[in-house]
Image (cartoon, rainbow, N blue to C red):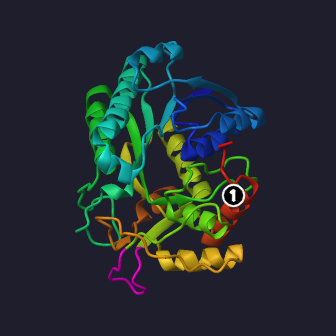
Amino acid sequence: MKKILITGGAGYIGSHVARELSKCKDYNITILDSLENGYIEPIETIKKDSKANVKFIKLDLRNRNEFNKLSNTKFDGVLHFAAFLKINESTQLPLKYFRNNITGSINLLEYMKNTGSQNLVFSSTCSLYSRNAQIPFTEESEICPENPYSESKHMIERIIYWVSRAHNLKYIILRYFNPYAVSKDLKIGYSLIPAPHLVPAAVRGALGLQDFKITCGKVDTPDGSTIRDYIHILDLVETHKIALQALLKKHKSDIYNVGIGKGHSVLEIIKLVGKITGVSMNPEMDTPRKGELAEVVGDTSKFQNEFSWKPKHTLEEGILSLNKWFKKRPNGYNK
């Protein structure tokens, strides 16, 4: 029986990953979340449907004293999702982001060192790459974060590297691109309301659930709108499952881009959302966000080749899942 720890397991990505891992009867899963930005409802769903033994502990990683709730348990694998993640907010409140993301990660790593827990899958981001790097970004592309959120993720990556050298920590860092969609049965979903991310925001806009405006300025792309690499949440979940299993089998520490390796523009997304929802989309232009890169697409061949993995879900499937989710749950888990 493998003991698995999931931090931030009540959040969007963490809860989807926790649910998938809970299907394995050979796992004993402990989920941590402060519930500051997460929700108890997906945890209850996971526990109800689980084949594994699943335990939830409300715990704030920033508070070292709260780690006594874990009773010095040695975990075979740790998946670390807990973080603040709004890029715009991070530029306004940098200390909040550094205090939460970095302090929480250091406390977790110290706990792992003290208990001999050696295998870590870390949730990182593609937004740490430099705007001067060639597209598509590879894992060796220049890094130059342009906001505190991305900077915090890069700093944690470096902390993990140095801890691994000193204390025999094994890690896989996944730098993912733009996740979207929800589970097919709509039991685990998306609840960042109002949605700050393009795909759910566009779906909610089409359904009349939130004001939706285009926030990208005119850029040098075929249709003049920014291009991004979008990965379906269930494909992203599978990459975490693969990474965890690899570490449990003594895989070497490494860093991987995770996306589909193909970009879609904002206008393409809007058109597709309109087609799937049946609502003609002609959103107004809002103030363009500063520092917007024209194109962000990843070279994901390293992960795909090494683990014989390919994304299985289409953009249409993902948008349809969000359309169904928000029709059923207009405010997500929020009452």
Residue located at (36% from left, 37% from top): 101
Whether the magenta-drawn stretch holds residue 224 is answered as yes
Q: Please give the range of residues in magenta.
A: 217-226
76 above or below 37?
above
Please provide percent x and percent y for residue 93.
Answer: 32, 43
Q: Residue 131's quadrant in the figure?
A: bottom left
Residue bearing mark 1:
326
User: Residue 83's spot in the image, x, y percent?
Assistant: 43, 39
> How many callouts does the rendering have?
1
Give the farthest residue toward the bottom: 222
Left or right relative to 187: residue 199: left
Please state which amino acid type lies under the numbered disc 1: Phe
Q: Residue at x 55, y 50 (%)?
A: 192
Q: Nearer the viewer, residue 82 or 113?
A: 82
Magenta span main SS: loop
User: Is 249 positioned to the left or the right of 16 in the image?
Assistant: left
Q: Is residue 112 above or below residue 315?
A: above
103 magenta-colored: no
The secondary element bearing badge 1 is classed as helix
- Local crowd size for mark 1, using a 10 Å CA cut-off: few (<14), some (14–19), many (≥20): many
Q: How far across and down, in percent of the image, does residue 106 sit?
A: 33, 29
Can residue 309 be spotted in the picture? no
Residue 237 seen anywhere in this rendered image of the structure:
yes
61 vs 71, nearest the viewer: 61
Q: Quadrant of the C terminus?
A: top right
Q: In the rendered image, which quarter contains the N terminus?
A: top right
Q: Name the foreground residue: 251 vs 272.
A: 272
Residue at 57%, 51% in the rendered image: 193
- Residue at 42% x, 71% y: name it: 286
- Seen in the image, is 207 located left or right of residue 134? right
**Spot occupied by residue 65 in the image (x, y as percentages of width and height):** 42, 14
